[in-house]
């Protein structure tokens, strides 16, 4: 599964200023997905220059200082003489650029690079100004180092992924240039007019010791999940409508009896999207014998609301991490150089795992709603499998199989990575977070949720069409019309996979949300 997800359109950010404070979610998305340029603030460059003098003073000290004049990890006991320290930094980056497997997506690498640059810009790492400015130049030239799927344990930072980026800064390794072509880093830098950096004391360590990869993927996932949560409310509303369910349970006063903010927001979306629906009005009278709907319909705000609150919690954690200066050792505000454990990815890893859980549960409920459409004992008068001629036609039977396969995988992806720990570096790094692995799982889960919601949208749309001559609500009708621009309505069986992909695009690009909002105004 692999789908590019676009957040709902916003004013494009042409330039992102990286300074002493944190970059925002919007900054990360702008650089990672929309190639916004980056610039370093003058205050940041001044602080970088000031703290570099601290490192240079320590480099001349006869006493060993970790990361400046010693080896690393379990090899930190060796004092490195001055004439070998440049080699020490080069060797660190080369040896740590040990990733393997498939290439990581361009947007992930760009997010990672922006976040490492943000930490360099705080001045807490002690690098020279040219290291930070050259890193920014790589981003602005669109040069994307090849980073591999495997290599990070999420402790001492995302070492291997960041090392592949640092290697490119040195003019070594393999990159994609601004046109996307694969080439040697040295050639790409020369073509872009960028001089490679010869690393000095502390700089190799500063380039690889951060949680930037897992954090970048967390920020992108939160951005996508917020849009998908709104989409889930829309598809749930379409299912309630087409299955002749009741919207009475979404009343604000009922929701207020259990005051979870996400639940209230989700229920408000359902009410807005279903407002004025002739299909809903058609069965409100006393002749309607249905007392209450199945949980997948009735409890949609409770499940989607819990997911919303979880995403909000993850966003708080991500915000704190964006404000962090993760390195070891760090240059403190009062000029001390201190070792620390801030590189441990546990806080980020936990919420990455948490989000994979709620994505799986949201997808599971969506699949259950889709399944109800296909069963004549539960779909309230629709054809079996929504087929044109059941028996001759299979309708959406296998579309639900596809949903079920994705949901099953998402349940496996929901197994937490952060409970695992494989010691490394001769037991110096004897507990690791596995946050990178959690982030990779979450990206696949977000893609899965996109596809599951798309199939529910496709199926609910067919159900609404089959309720004719009754008309849907204006908002659900707008979503249906957007779908019908690219996918035809009910009829004999046809090649279904392209229609599923049309629906996936409608969800992934935010077009389904925009269609509903053209009637309702902004949804939660």
Image (cartoon, rainbow, N blue to C red):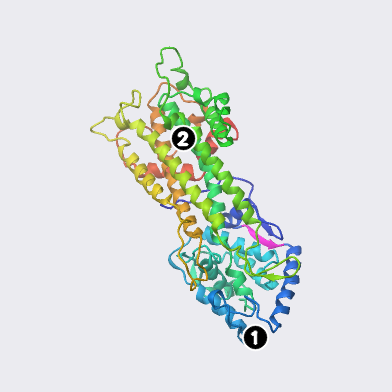
Query: Separation of disc 2 and disc 1 at Cα?
Result: 64 Å
Q: Tell me if residue 402 is in the magenta stretch.
A: no
Q: Position of residue 364 (x, y in %)?
A: 41, 40
Nearer to the camera, 131 or 99? 99
| Drawn side of residue 444 relative to residue 517, left or right | left
Check the picture and name the quadrant holding the C terminus: top right
Whether pointer 2 and pointer 1 mark residues with C-beta atoms closer than 8 Å, the reply is no
Looking at the rendering, the stretch of residues picked out in magenta corresponds to 36-40
Q: Secondary structure at mark 2?
A: helix
| Residue that numbered label 1 is attached to | 82
Q: Main secondary structure of the magenta part?
A: strand
**Which mark is in front, 2 or 1?**
1
Q: Is residue 3 above or below residue 426?
A: above
| Drawn side of residue 98 relative to residue 45, left or right | left
Nearer to the camera, 114 or 484? 114
Q: Position of residue 475 (x, y in %)?
A: 52, 30
| Drawn side of residue 341 relative to residue 284, left or right | right
Q: Is residue 52 above or below residue 317?
A: below
Q: Quadrant of residue 59?
A: bottom right
Can I make out residue 387 in this image?
A: no
Nearer to the camera, 202 or 507? 202
Q: Secondary structure at mark 1?
A: helix
Q: Position of residue 376 (x, y in %)?
A: 30, 27
Q: Quadrant of residue 168?
A: bottom right
Farthest residue in the top direction? 286
Q: Is residue 478 above or below residue 276?
A: below
Can I make out residue 471 in this image?
A: yes
| Residue that numbered label 2 is attached to | 235
Q: Position of residue 133 (x, y in %)?
A: 67, 69
Assess disc 1: are there few (<14), some (14-19) or many (≥20) residues with their C-alpha within 10 Å of its C-alpha.
some
């Amino acid at each position: 599964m692999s789908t590019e997800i676009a957040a709902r359109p916003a004013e494009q950010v042409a330039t992102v200023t990286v300074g002493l404070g944190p970059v925002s979610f919007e900054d990360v998305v702008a650089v990672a997905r929309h190639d916004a340029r980056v610039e370093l603030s003058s205050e940041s460059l001044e602080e970088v220059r000031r703290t570099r003098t601290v490192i240079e003073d320590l480099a001349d000290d006869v006493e060993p200082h970790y990361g400046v004049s010693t080896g690393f990890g379990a090899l930190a006991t060796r004092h490195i003489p001055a004439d070998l320290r440049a080699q020490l930094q080069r060797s660190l980056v080369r040896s740590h650029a040990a990733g393997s497997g498939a290439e990581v997506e361009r947007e992930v690498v760009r997010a990672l690079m922006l976040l490492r640059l943000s930490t360099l810009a705080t001045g807490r790492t002690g690098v020279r100004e040219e290291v930070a400015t050259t890193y920014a130049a790589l981003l602005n030239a669109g040069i994307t180092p090849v980073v591999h799927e495997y290599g990070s344990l999420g402790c001492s930072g995302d070492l291997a992924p960041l090392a592949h980026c640092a290697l490119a800064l040195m003019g070594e390794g393999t990159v994609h240039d601004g046109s996307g072509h694969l080439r040697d880093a040295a050639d790409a830098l020369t073509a872009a007019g960028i001089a490679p950096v010869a690393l000095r004391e502390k700089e190799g360590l500063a380039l690889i010791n951060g949680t930037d990869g897992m954090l970048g993927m967390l920020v992108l996932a939160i951005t996508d999940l917020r849009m998908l949560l709104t989409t889930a409310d829309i598809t749930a509303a379409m299912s309630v409508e087409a299955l002749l369910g009741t919207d009475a349970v979404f009343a604000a006063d009922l929701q207020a009896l259990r005051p979870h903010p996400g639940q209230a927001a989700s229920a408000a979306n359902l009410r807005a999207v279903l407002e004025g629906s002739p299909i809903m009005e058609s069965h409100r009278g006393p002749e309607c014998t249905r007392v209450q709907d199945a949980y997948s319909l009735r409890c949609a705000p409770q499940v989607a609301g819990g997911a919303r609150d979880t995403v909000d919690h993850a966003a708080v954690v991500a915000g704190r991490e964006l404000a962090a200066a993760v390195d070891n050792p760090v240059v403190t505000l009062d000029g001390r150089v201190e070792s620390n454990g801030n590189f441990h990815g546990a806080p980020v890893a936990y919420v990455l795992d948490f989000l994979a859980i709620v994505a799986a549960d949201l997808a599971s409920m969506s699949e259950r709603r889709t399944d109800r459409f296909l069963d004549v004992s539960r779909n309230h008068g629709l054809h079996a499998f929504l087929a044109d001629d059941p028996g001759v036609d299979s309708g959406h039977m296998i579309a639900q199989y596809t949903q079920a396969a994705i949901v099953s995988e998402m349940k496996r992806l929901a197994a937490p990575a952060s409970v695992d720990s494989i010691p490394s570096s001769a037991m110096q790094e004897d507990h690791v977070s596995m946050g990178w692995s959690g982030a990779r799982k979450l990206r696949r889960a977000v893609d899965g949720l996109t596809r599951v919601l798309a199939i529910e949208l496709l199926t609910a749309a067919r159900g609404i069409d089959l309720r004719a001559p009754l008309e849907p609500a204006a908002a659900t009708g707008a979503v249906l019309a957007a779908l019908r621009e690219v996918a035809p309505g009910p009829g004999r069986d046809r090649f279904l996979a392209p229609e599923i992909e049309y629906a996936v695009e409608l969800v992934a690009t935010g077009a389904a949300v925009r269609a509903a909002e053209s009637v309702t105004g902004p949804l939660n």
